[in-house]
Image: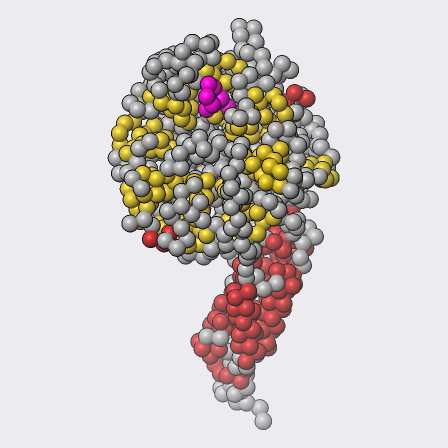
Amino acid sequence: MPAHPLHPSPVHGTAAHRTGLWARLSAAICLLLGIVTGVPGAWLAGLGGSPYYLILGLALAANAVLLWRGARRAYLLYAVILLATMAWALFEVGFNFWPLAPRGDILVPFGLWLLAPWVVRSFPIARRPWRMPLVGAIFASLIVVGIALAKTNDDIAGFLPTRIVGALPQTDLAAVPDDEWQAYGRTGAGDHFSPLHQITPANVGNLKVAWTFRTGDMKGPNDSLETTDEVTPLKIGDTVYLCSPHQKVFALDAATGKQKWVFDPQVKDDPTFQHLTCRGVSYHATPADARTSDGAPAPLECRQRLFLPTNDGRMFAIDATTGKPCAGFGQGGQVDLKDGMTVKHKGFYEGTSPPVVTRQMVIMAGAVIDNYSTNEPSGVVRGFDVYTGKLVWAWDSGAIDENALASATHHYTANSPNSWSISAVDEKLGLVYLPMGGPAPDIWGGNRTPEMERYGSALVALDVNTGKRVWSYQTVHHDLWDMDLPSQPSLLDLRTAKGIVPAIYVPTKSGNIFVLDRRTGKLIVGAPERPVPQGAAPGDRLSPTQPFSELTFQPKEKLTDANMWGATMFDQLACRIQFKRMRYEGPFTPPSTQATLVFPGDVGMFEWGGIAVDPYRQIAIANPIVFPFVSKLLPRGPNNPAAPNATHPSGSETGVQPMYGVPFGVQLNPFLSPLGFPCMAPPWGYMAGIDLNTHKILWKHKVGTTRDATAVPLPFKLGMPMLGGTMATAGGVTFLTATMDNYIRAFDVTSGKMLWQARLPAGGQSTPMSYAQGGKQYVVTAAGGHGSFGTKLGDYVIAYALP
């Protein structure tokens, strides 16, 4: 029977059969999700990446149409979308929570939104959806997430041996009293190990702040972005010595932290400094029978002296008792490290790391500005008389005559490889061990001479008294990735079946730890040469092979787009697109104009903090990080001139680097999503224990949380990037403060289990040390933050002790 025109049919057009506002809003949201997933998903598929985002985008668009129409099948289709997404995610990453989470962190909440009563009621009554398929899909997704959360474990559980091997004849342990810390790594061996044992796994949880000292030295408005507090203090007698970012030196009472004196070298603020940091000072005590390099009796002044390099290219000798310059050293207590250089611009040559001090020599290397031009200071290493400051020898890594001294007719070689980090020394063998960087600029090397190439990214052993090279071992050939040697090497008298072998451990940015006989430079642990990707940028060349140590933290598998991460599936998708657009064929993929993924990144798996070595147990504690970078070569053009238009660069190691004098500039950045999240899934940082008799990694645990890295202080334990190193003790406890969250932590050396942590008032991008005073063991760390690392800046030095 036809309906009366004034009375609509009960089947068509009534409110009971019209899709409501909430359902249509849901349709619009679903369509938007489909567009922002499907369109870039098509791009990713076209690049050879996973087609799933394209399929997902089409499915979401179809679901949007069903929602708009008020069709109950919309809920069934969305349930299928959720289940398919979970199946795909499990196929890609398995039951691993953090890689799994971004794949569903938008879809599951939207599914819950569709179950809201007001959304369901806005469907026509006759077509109200049956919700059980969607409820089941969400429940199944949450079960998958729960299982993944329970199963996720990126750690390696194990135990280091507790053996004690006894006295060691060649490392210089006996020369430093147990209660002191006389060099950056406590001894010249770079072991970062304290023989004190009052603090143990059983009582470390009782540590309290014993004293706090504030230097008052904070980043100013004209300071570099790279203003950092990376100091490891010294302790001699009853005094603690430390320096601050502007190279002020402080002497503190070891029991109370009260200031005794301060020395200020008057380093002026300058935003063009590429670094503004002081990793430490060096110490020398005058022996009773000491003589100068000229044979004269050592001066009576400054019987105990400190050596301080500065960021403006000077080195001071300071009386450790009074804080006054040692007048007989150089000119009024200082030498000019820019002498003999062709380039003397302020900030181009910086003393950021403490020198090596031996019985008669102070051996100084320095940092040279990265990636600015082909006209930069020399990386020359020099030996000065420890008493007079007289230049005794020079070793110029880029010169044909490596030991030629500067004169009116000879200058040190510009752009030669430099040694910016901390060196180690074996005075019994008479050798100093230099971790070398590469020639500048770092990322294109078509113009490098054979002399420039031979010591780039090499460990070089020099005679401490003459500067003559004894041996060298190159860890990267023709380095185009800034894979220089960033860490102080560590010496160990290694017990083997064939007897004691004097070894040296060389951590690298690539994650390899090379193990060499420190007498000869011959490998103890194998490092076979393996083929690496080829195809250099125009005008450059590549080594066909690179050495890969058998003791390594380098990831075994190459990255794929399935390893990409982000806060949501959208920035994860953006990361996947970035990844597929870049050149990446594994480690040592050449720099390119396409943009190259550098993994491990040029920030390094190991940095200046080095490793801690227990010579008695023959074990080591390391804290490698895993974080990719992107380098993109920039051909010369209007916005990339071939020559500088200003005298000084800006102080930064990321962003556009001009590399004047070669055909390209370069842009260097961490690999981040558009929202600023890492594009590679966590973890990004570990603590690890190594048995040095077998050279096996026996435990590895991620360390660090997001507590201070996000706007909302959520302490997710992801394993965070770090800057700084570990310190181990004979008590069986190792300490770390290097992570991006503001904590000092203590770990059981044997198992790696975290035993204690305490909040720091600022970032702790430093390496702790330990000493004893008045029968009490102290652990001391600097908490001053790091500018480009993004941690909170401060001016704190904090000592902890048992009550």
First to last magenta residue range: 357-365
* Magenta run includes residue 358: yes
What's the residue at 49%, 34% (across, down)? Answer: 190
- Answer whether residue 431 is visible to the viewer in this image: yes
Pick the front one: 701 or 631: 701
Query: Percent from the top left, x then y, of residue 207?
Result: 33, 50
Specify the farthest residue to the top: 408
| Left/right of residue 685 with respect to residue 252 in the rendered view | right
Residue 171 against residue 210 in the figure, above or below: above
What's the residue at 50%, 52% (across, down)? Answer: 750
Coloring scheme of the render? secondary structure
What's the residue at 52%, 66% (across, down)? Answer: 150
Pick the front one: 288 or 538: 288
Pick the front one: 195 or 249: 195
Query: In the rendered image, which quarter contains the N terminus?
Result: bottom right
Pick the front one: 331 or 124: 331
Specify the farthest residue to the bottom: 1
Query: Percent from the top left, x then y, of residue 279?
Result: 43, 32
What's the residue at 56%, 18% (across, down)? Answer: 467
